[in-house]
Image (spheres, rainbow, N blue to C red):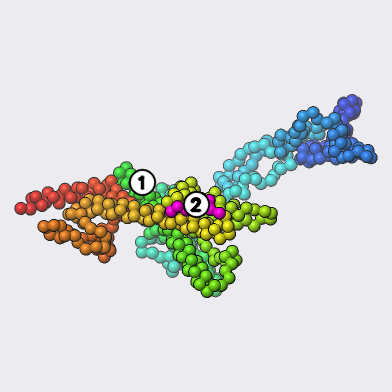
């Protein structure tokens, strides 16, 4: 019987195609096997849609493979992106246990591993990852002319460069292997500074004329300060860590309060500008009525900021609309403002639903817009008074805590108050006095003035000063 005759008989019985299965297996058989089968199926199984039948109806009856339509939706895609290996009747590529050497090693060590026979004699594939650092080499003449240093001898410099070459500029390892008994004791920064200074001088000397070479610069002083700061940060006590966290929290509070103040100031400025624009509009209208000029309010109405009272919607849609809809307050007005408007109109005996003529509607809307503006201005004024009073009490508390004697009485910016039958009470400090005190002692009026540790230091200082006063007589 021939060599491959039994295999051919088995393929004939199982109706497997032959011919292409001869020879060793390659990667194309694994990767392109699905594509070849898909091409064969598309070429053989092609059905034509009957005339008069819609494409959707035909898709329900048959698919490309003329399979019955599925009863439930199914996913026919493969679970993995990579195609699984499908073993056929081809011969497997042979492997061999063979020796190899690593070019990165200089001791000539021989190792063994499994490898395909087709790759026998090739270089070790992982040898390309062996990257060596190029450490510069200098001659005796170059050292005497350019690299001489009073703090370093040539033997010590040669020892440093030998270690840098052996350990690929890993200066922590170089410092650990440095011969501190034969030479002076050096720090890692000293070794780095010496090495990079020599590299920079050699690059500058060996550079071609007319070119600017890239210089290696190492700031040893900055590196020493950085490590000192890290060491101080690491050696902090728990009290110092707690004090820093407390200060950071107070800083965040101060920043949030500052943002709130800025926002309130912007809102207040918008209200003031809105009030000014309203007064200017009233004056312009009065002048126009005195001159008896035809005034079209809708066309010549000056632009008012959106924050000026109430912004009533414009009804410009086609169709019939009621004029009373223009008097309806928009949804942006809150319930508190609506109640305040109704209360003021009731107190002034103004009808809440007047006759909606053209002039009455416009004047009634302007009146309610002005009332909302006045309401907002009153709120802003009350908030400012509350903040002023709170800051005044806080300032008095700070003066008491600072041991300033008595608490000043009187309004800010006013003179001293004279108590009946007694001397004049000290006046409230003016801006110049506060600036002078701020130069001597910085106090955060908004935030908490003292941290826990600083408060302890102040209490201890005050107690020691009182003891000295007692012992002085």
- Name the residue carrying label 1: 245
Res 145 → quadrant: bottom left
Which mark is in front, 1 or 2?
2
Depth check, front residue: 337 or 100:
337
- Name the residue carrying label 2: 351
Residue 147 position, x and y percent, is 43, 65
Q: In percent of the image, x 36 and y 46: which residue is there? A: 245
- Say which quadrant the N terminus sits in: top right
Q: In percent of the image, x 24 and y 46: which residue is there? A: 456
Number of other residues with Cα within 10 Å of mark 2, as a class: few under 14, some 14 to 19, many 20 or more: few
Residue 401 position, x and y percent, is 22, 50
Q: Where 443 sits versus 28, above or below?
A: below
Which residue ends up furthest to the left in the rendered image? 473
What's drawn in magenta, residue-wise? Answer: 348-355
Depth check, front residue: 11 or 133:
11
Q: Where 341 sits versus 45, above or below?
A: below
């Amino acid at each position: 019987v021939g060599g491959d005759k039994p295999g051919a008989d088995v393929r004939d019985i199982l109706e497997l195609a032959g011919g292409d299965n001869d020879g060793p297996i390659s990667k194309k058989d694994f990767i392109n096997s699905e594509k070849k089968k898909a091409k064969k199926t598309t070429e053989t199984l092609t059905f034509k849609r009957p005339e008069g039948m819609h494409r959707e109806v035909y898709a329900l009856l048959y698919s490309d493979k003329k399979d019955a339509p599925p009863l439930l939706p199914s996913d026919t895609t493969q679970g993995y992106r990579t195609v699984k290996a499908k073993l056929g009747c081809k011969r497997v590529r042979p492997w061999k246990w063979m020796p190899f050497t690593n070019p990165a090693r200089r001791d000539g060590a021989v190792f063994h591993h499994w490898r395909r026979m087709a790759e026998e004699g090739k270089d070790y594939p992982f040898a390309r990852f062996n990257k060596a650092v190029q450490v510069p080499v200098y001659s005796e003449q170059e050292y005497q002319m350019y690299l001489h240093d009073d703090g370093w001898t040539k033997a010590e410099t040669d020892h440093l460069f030998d270690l840098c070459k052996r350990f690929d500029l890993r200066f922590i390892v170089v410092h650990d292997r440095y011969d501190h008994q034969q030479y002076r004791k050096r720090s890692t920064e000293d070794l780095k500074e010496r090495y990079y200074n020599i590299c920079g001088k050699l690059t500058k000397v060996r550079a071609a004329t007319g070119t600017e070479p890239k210089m290696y610069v190492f700031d040893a002083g900055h590196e020493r300060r950085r490590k000192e700061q890290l060491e101080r940060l690491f050696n902090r006590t728990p009290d110092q860590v707690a004090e820093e966290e407390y200060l950071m929290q107070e800083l965040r509070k101060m920043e949030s309060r500052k943002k709130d103040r800025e926002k309130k100031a912007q809102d207040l400025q918008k209200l003031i500008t809105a009030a000014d624009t309203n007064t200017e509009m009233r004056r312009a209208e009065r002048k126009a009525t005195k001159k008896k000029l035809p005034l079209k309010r809708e066309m010549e109405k000056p632009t008012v900021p959106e924050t000026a009272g109430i912004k009533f919607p414009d009804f410009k849609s086609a169709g019939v609309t009621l004029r009373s809809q223009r008097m309806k307050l928009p949804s942006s007005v809150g319930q508190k403002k609506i109640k305040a408007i109704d209360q003021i109109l009731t107190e002034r005996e103004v009808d809440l639903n007047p006759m909606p003529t053209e002039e009455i509607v416009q004047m009634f809307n302007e009146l309610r817009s002005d009332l909302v503006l006045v309401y907002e201005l009153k709120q802003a004024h009350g908030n400012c008074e509350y903040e002023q009073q709170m800051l005044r009490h806080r300032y008095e508390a700070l003066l008491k805590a600072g041991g300033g004697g008595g608490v000043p009485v009187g309004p800010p910016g006013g003179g001293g108050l004279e108590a009946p039958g007694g001397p004049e009470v000290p006046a409230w400090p003016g801006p110049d006095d506060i600036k002078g005190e701020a130069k001597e002692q910085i106090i955060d009026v908004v935030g908490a003035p003292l941290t826990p540790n600083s408060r302890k230091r102040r209490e201890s200082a005050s107690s020691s000063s009182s003891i000295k006063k007692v012992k002085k007589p």
